[in-house]
Amino acid sequence: MICSRFVIAGVALALLFAVSGALGAGGGEEPGGFAGLENQVREFTLPNGLTFLVLERREVPVFAFRTYVDAGSVDEVAGVTGIAHMFEHMAFKGTPHIGTTDFPSEKESLAKVDRAWADLLAERRKRHRADSTRIRELETLFKAAQEEAGRYVVSNDFGSILEQEGANGLNAGTGFDATEFYYDLPSNKLELWAMMEGDRLANPVLREFYKERDVVIEERRMRIESSPSGRLVEELLQTAFVAHPYGNGLVGHRSDLESFTREEAEEFYRRHYVAKNMTIALVGDVDFATVQKLARKYFSGIPDAPVPPPVDTVEPPQKAEKRLVMEDEAQPMAFLAYHMPDRNDRRYQAYLALADILGRGRSSRLYTGLVKEDRVAVEAGSFASLPGEKYPSILFVYTVPAPGTDPDSVVSAFDRRVGGLLRERPVTQEELDGYKTRARARFWREIQSNQGMAGQLAYYQMMTGDWRNLFKQIDQVNAVRVEDVMKAARESLREENRTVAVLRQKSAS
Amino acid sequence: MLNQGRCLVWTVAGIALLATVASAAGDASLWDRGKLDYPPLREVRLPQVDRHVLPNGLVIYILADRDFPVVQGRILVRAGSMLDSEEKAGLASIAGTVLRTGGSAKFPGDDLDKRLEAIGASVEFELGMTEGSGSFWCLEENTSEVLTILADLLRRPSFAEEKLDLAKAEMHRAVASRNDEPMDIIFREGGRLVWGPRHPYGFRPEHETINRLQRQDLVEFHQRHFFPDRIYLTLWGDFETQEILTQITALFGDWSPAGTAAPPRPAAPAIVPGGGLAFAQKTGMTNAWVFVGHLGIQADNEDFAAMNVLGEILGGSFASRLFNEIRTKRGLAYAAGGNPGTDFPRPGIFSGYAGTRTDSALVVLGLIRREIGRITEEPVTEAELKKAKDTILNSYVFRFASKGQIAARMAYLDFNGYPADFTATYPEKVRKLTVQDLRAAARRNIHPDDLQMLVLGNEKEFAQPLSSLGRPYQLIDLTIPEPAVEIETVEATPASLEEGRKLLAAAAKATGGAAWSSVKSISTDFHGGWKVADQEIIFTGRTVRALQGRAYVNQKLPFGELVMAVTDSVGWRKIASSPILDLTPQEIAQLREEAARDLWSLFAKKESYQAQALDPEELEGKACDVLRIKGGGLSQTLLFLDRSTKMPVALRYPGKSSTGEPAMVTEVFSDFRPVGGVKIPHTTRTLHDGQLAITRTADQVVINADIPPVLFERPRP
């Protein structure tokens, strides 16, 4: 959108260098490289508020895109938890033009499905006064309505079209903070991408909704209900967060899932999948002007509506240690959750360093302390920002006690190690430098590919407000000092600031 | 989903905009893909990649790329499991693993892992079937260090003993679980049918072959096959070409070449006329599985492009013929597909497969054969041809997704003897194909009557038995052969047998004599500890042994409760909250052998055993008489008796360690106490290859307790 002469000249120069770099092997004299890339990223915003970020990388005739929507499970409300994640499953079900043999007829059938579901739900809601015979009748009618609607479905149409046109890596993912959609395509299919992505975002058809809902329930059963560690983490988050929705699960409460309606899903979509609430990044062999033209043509249908408000609830400071104990036949575990600031807090980088030095890898304090030296654990580690980064979240510590060791002993050993870090053995410059090296390595691995770069551009734009922050990331990591990390440790690694979750073995009967 | 009604709630400006939007959304022609006209895909401009060959034959592909401050690369080595002998199948694979995990003298294994982790770098290596391949990645500032590590691993690997043990244990686990997944089974066994079990490509590791591997084998393998003139290195990233070349020369330049060509790949066997039919019985799956195949072609065959297109049409995707006929049309399969059988270093396997409803295995076999026949008889349709070409050509560009990937691919093709323009000329070969070309290629390369066919499932559930196919078939036994850990055989003489008989009788007398014949059951409540790796697992439980071959075990372990019972020839078990399963014939045989080896059996039924006296030995500090017991269900069991008291000291027999590897098991008895007229050991220590593994202490032993018969019966689910 900002097409000043300076930018054009800069881009042209950078392009020249990029091209000559590709042709010359050992040359490598051009001043471009990574720093040059920042000047090559261009952006524009459609009248409806949808922002596009475009980075031309012309070496190979392919491109990657990432659609990043600022809607995740943190945006859900009570009674409808798990709805954000449904859109991961619904992502490629199609539109009125894709995935159906006859949309007008299908539309009517879908309405019938919704009505059949509403009737069934109404009877179930009578709870102890529900008529079980009636329920069975309504279940049969509901199933029949779904089958009827299913006759119009062209299975996997969206995916098949893309496969035939050479798409690579078709995927969608939901987290607590955001939902993303992505794949790569040969670059001569840019207009196909624009058409399909624009159609999908503006006109999604939630076909096979209830079928997918059942798949999600099964997924929940496998990942959480059948997994002791999954259950423990769920309990931990629910306990650590008394007010903020980070305490809800990603997949949702089962009873909420079971009572979803398509209308609720559409309502969530209407509220969150608006143009200003998403960013689309394209990286690869694309031409900026062409992207602009195609964007106007195909993406203008996404509603121009206000960005929904962020979550206003702020988790109040925790004033006392919380402990929860679960008994199970499974292997014992001990998890600890310490409150930490959000991504945009000026202390965030120090917390990332702390989590890494404390518990990432075999040289970390937790591994060397609890696994190698004390031998009270067979696994021990930590990482930051569970379950999300947009709002203040959790620095998460996990341990698997050694056989015969009580999980509470592991927690005590952990406390001693934390005490050591805070007093006798503070973080060293060497440890901090090691973290910075690893952080840089992870950074470069991520953005080397078109898809990785597209993802990072979109992420920085939506999470931090400006994609340019991607190019400031390394400097921010390097600016962290030992004092900053120690301050973060003193601030957060306090007993009053934590929730401890222990999985203990059921005592033998 | 948007519709005009809901749009009205938004702002006025929004409405004006949305009026155009609404019409756009309602304008079906906007979304009409048929109108799209794609420009031709821009040609992939291959970057300039430098190729150097050192005097010792090391080939190096170098691509300087300043985009990011990182350096990465690939390694190819002319060595693989095709070089394994049958007796040591698994050697190459383990050598490849331990080359990396075992580190070198300068960079010992665990320290190496820690260091790479600390600098965010990676070095990986493995030996596959026809070649070894490795990779590395590092920040530019660590290039020198990582290249030094790489050179040391390739030239001077330590093959550390402890890492070899770890790799062997891993492979034992892989062998033990190789029949868990049906698709693993059909492709493995199908491959063996096509290559033939005597062909190196058909060898597979067994417990026994893994046991034979010593560190010396790995050292010799490395000495025999790792030479600079058998290795290709590809590097790309943030460096100066000349500088990196100097570094590589310094690290590899003084490595002496082999001077001879690498061992050739084994010749492909001929396709057996008439093919073959094989069946493997397996229960407990939700589907039956079918595989058909025969030898395919190599990428240098003139029909390479055509076969790839045919493969796409036949079984490449959801729209393919196999998927369509079997699943979409008839709903008989959960999965169906095929493989064109084209490969670079060697011919592939042309195949079709499906996972079917359990009753329909033979019907689906027929359908697959029919489709394979059809594709050689009738030309494919123009529409199928176009779709397959599009799918192949449209995604082809992703083989060149990055400059580094292009360089690596160049090296790979060169390594396998393909011309430099192979990749560039392939798309045109695909594009030019006509339906007649495909038909001709199909007739040359697809032989519907010479397919090796494999059916996997529970024949009892098939709608028709295999014999209904009217042709002889091979039965494939999926049982994983037990390793051979053996008791040494000594020729028995009448004297040693008589001596043995007397000693056995003496032991029976010392522990109760005639009282043994009154024993009808023994119930034991126990607790114990079980050493696995470095850790000890505590358990408690109860066993009940009774007459008529009945046994019951209830053991509480950390992951849950294990309950098992057997009545002569049937049995069941239940672990934690898993469903109740039947015991397999192998498991029942094993339980029977355990019962036959129990001291109660040995002494109460001593006449049914043959006891051979061997030379006395010292065990656990005691001078012992040693008897080899045979018969009565046992083949290799040694019984150690205290020379002075004739009380049992230990039993020894071939078994398995806690990690599933074969081991010599020794059960050492102590704390004999009288119960119900006989003497029962209250402590048993079990050693695996001489190392203490399990300790069991009886808290209570009851002879002839009142046992409800229902204890042994399979509970209702």
Image (cartoon, helix red, strand yellow):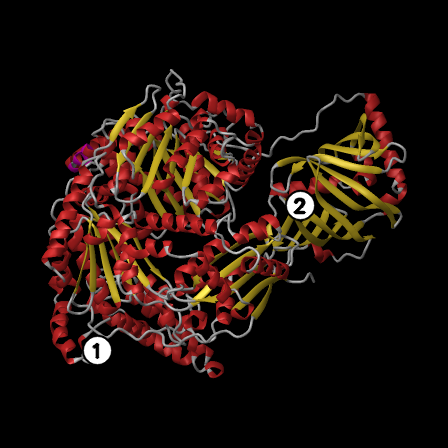
Asked whether B443 or A34 is in front, the reply is A34
Q: From the viewer's perspective, is A326 left or right of B521? A: left
Residue that carries the numbered disc 1 in the rendered image:
B6
Q: Is residue B256 above or below residue B598?
A: above
Residue A320's spot in the image, x, y percent? 55, 73
Same chain assignment for discs 2 and 1: yes
Tell me which chain the residue with mark 1 is part of. Answer: B
Q: Position of residue A124 (x, y in %)?
A: 43, 78
In the figure, B266 relative to B122: above or below?
above
Query: Which x, y percent locates residue B347?
Result: 33, 29
Magenta residues (range): B425-431
Q: How many marks?
A: 2
Q: Secondary structure at mark 1?
A: helix
Q: Report which quarter residue B258 is drawn in.
A: top left
Q: Residues within 10 Å of mark 1 (few under 14, many from 20)?
A: few
A182 in the magenta segment:
no
Q: Can you give x and y, in whole percent of width and height, for residue B335 in the image?
A: 37, 48
The overriding secondary structure of the stretch rendered in magenta is helix
Is residue A313 or residue B714 the one in the foreground? A313
Question: Mark 1 is on which residue type?
Answer: Arg
Q: Nearer the viewer, residue A56 or B370?
A: A56
* Position above or below: A324 against B513: below
Image position of A206 (left or right of B78): left
> Which residue does the numbered mark 2 point to in the structure image?
B531
